[in-house]
Amino acid sequence: MHSFRYVRGKLFCEGVAVESLVKKFGTPLYVYSQETLTDHYSKLDQALAPLDHMICYAMKANSNLGVMRTLANLGSGFDVVSGGELQRVIAAGGNPKKCVFAGVGKTEEEIEFALRKGIYSFNVESEPEIARINRVAARLKKIAPIAVRVNPNIDAHTHAKITTGTYENKFGIQFEHVEGVYARASKLKNIKLHGLQMHIGSQLTQVTPYELAVKKVAPMVKTLAARYGFEFFSIGGGLGIVYKPALASGSAAWWKSSEAKGIMTPATYAEKLVPLLQPIGLRILVEPGRFIVGNAGIFVTRVEYVKKTGKKNFVIVDGAMNDLIRPAFYDSYHEILSLSEKKGATISSDVVGGVCESSDFFCKDRELPKVGDGDYLALLSAGAYGSVMGSNYNSRALAAEVLVNKTKFAAVREREKLERIWEHEKIPAWLK
Ligand code: LLP
């Protein structure tokens, strides 16, 4: 479900016309719906209700403080991948004790900070990392809770750049090596073996790879849990969303139509996985990012020019790949709508930004309504891996972000001031 729909020909986010936000905050602009965030979190929470479970929102998908506070208020924990993300959890009012810390490259400083904050678990990705955590914990006279991230070597059949559960990737510890790693780690004085974790990839739209991975890993989790007294098993994130077509009609109908198309929903995910997970008898963690926030956000951009070449119709907008890099990076599809509904003839168009790269595009050869200077376009499903992957390439300021709650709205990130981009740069004395 999401809360972006046309009302009398104008695109609304909940009870607010997106055009009015554009007038107030300008473009490029990210707009998030609090109702959608809440709905997605709650749908998953309800589906997992038969299990002792904890949702650790993968904040790498969208770490805006307003988004994070919405989820913290719902009781969410967080999956963090850096000391910076953990600091953000605290800044957003989240609970570090509900945080798991993933990532292959944790530094000493990050480990120390996480230990001092009392995080729930380190999800470790190598033996040298375990040794390092043990060393830092000993220095601080603390016991570090850890879970090994098992790489189950299951192909999630998703985009090559976002699959993580096969031996081609840098992530986790090979399935066959895991028991030995726990045996060696169990001898370390400042380590507590707290659980086991896996994450097989992102944007999974079918439940089958999860089933295969859980079936493969479950016997090992049970054995190790009995041996070392585990508290949890994390099955990672990765729940996919519908990018195409992305405009919702009604809540219940939308979920049903996803199910009819065979696309995994929280209900179908839980239906298959709960019976496999329940007998394990541990707390189950999930780390969804995209599922919670993907369809809760849109990216709004203004049409600057329309340019026809011999072969193409280019719609040139004020947003660019530095704001939303997913099409350039993954060839990903984002539905594009005009803020004012247009029902007339369409024209095959490339929507492109002003950055000096051929890969700076939002779509290619897409049938879109005719638009011109001053029209506004919305790219849907832009809530996840949108603003967080923004950059200052071409000295472009980061976009503003707005959170909507029914008829209320607030800037949750102001548009970046240009001078801030070079604030930390210095001209050496010898050049002055
Ligand atoms: N847990 C771990 C250990 C992860 O590495 C990730 C994502 C997640 C959870 C959350 O995955 P999600 O539920 O959002 O699929 N930038 C890419 C996606 C990269 C995903 C990285 N890891 C994109 O725009 O598609």
Image: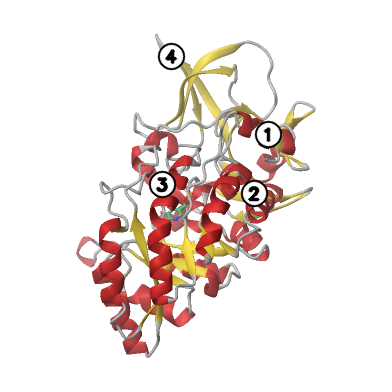
Three-letter code, disc 1:
Lys
Residue 201 - label: 3
Residue 146 against residue 362 in the figure, above or below: below
Q: Under 8 Å from ligand 1: the CB of mark 3?
A: yes
Q: How packed is label 4: few (under 14 Cα within 10 Å), some, or many (20 or more)? A: some
What residue sits right under mark 4 in the picture? Answer: 312
Q: Under 8 Å from ligand 1: the CB of mark 1?
A: no
What residue sits right under mark 2 in the picture? Answer: 40
Residue 256 locus on image (x, y percent):
68, 34
> What residue do we see at 50% from left, 51% from top?
61
Earlier sequence position, callout 4 versus callout 1:
1
Dot 3: element? loop
Name, please, the residue furthest toward the left.
Answer: 430
What residue sits right under mark 1 in the picture? Answer: 256
Three-letter code, disc 4:
Lys
- Mark in front: 4 vs 1: 1
Residue 278 locus on image (x, y percent):
56, 59
